[in-house]
Image (spheres, rainbow, N blue to C red):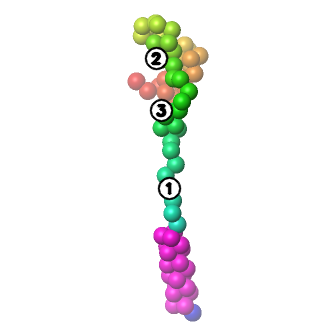
Amino acid sequence: DLITNLQNARDIQDMRIKKKQRQHIFPQPGSLYLAKTSTVPRISLRGAVEGRVPSPCSHKQLYMYGVSEHCVKIN
């Protein structure tokens, strides 16, 4: 009985493996690739920062700009 159950489990597993091998799966484009190849004009970095030069910011300012607290703790 135990040997029969093991044989059935192996057969089912073999069927699953063969079914997966028959499938044709194609990779989906990621969000960065879609943004890069999009026809929508991209904003320049200088335009995004309104021409300001880099300067130190407090944690509160970074949080107000939308940086998560988890990222702020990384230095």
Where does the magenta region start and end? 2-22
Badges 3 and 2: C-beta atoms under 8 Å apart? Answer: no
Which dot marks residue 36? 3
Instruction: Work out whether 5 lies above or below 64.
Output: below
Tell me the SS state at disc 3. Answer: helix
Q: Where is residue 38 in the image (x, y as percent from the top left)?
A: 53, 32
Of all residues, the one furthest to the bottom in this rendering is 1
Identify residue for label 2.
45
Residue appearing at x 48%, y 70% in the figure = 21
- Camera-near label (3 vs 2) is 3
Instruction: Work out whether 29 lies above or below 42.
Output: below
Instruction: Work out whether 65 lies above or below 12.
Output: above
Tell me the SS state at disc 1. Answer: loop
Label 1 neighbourhood size at 10 Å, few (<14), some (14-19), many (20+)? few
Identify residue for label 1.
26
Q: What residue type is labelled 2?
A: Leu
Q: Is residue 13 something one can see in this rendering?
A: no
Q: Where is residue 51 in the image (x, y as percent from the top left)?
A: 46, 7
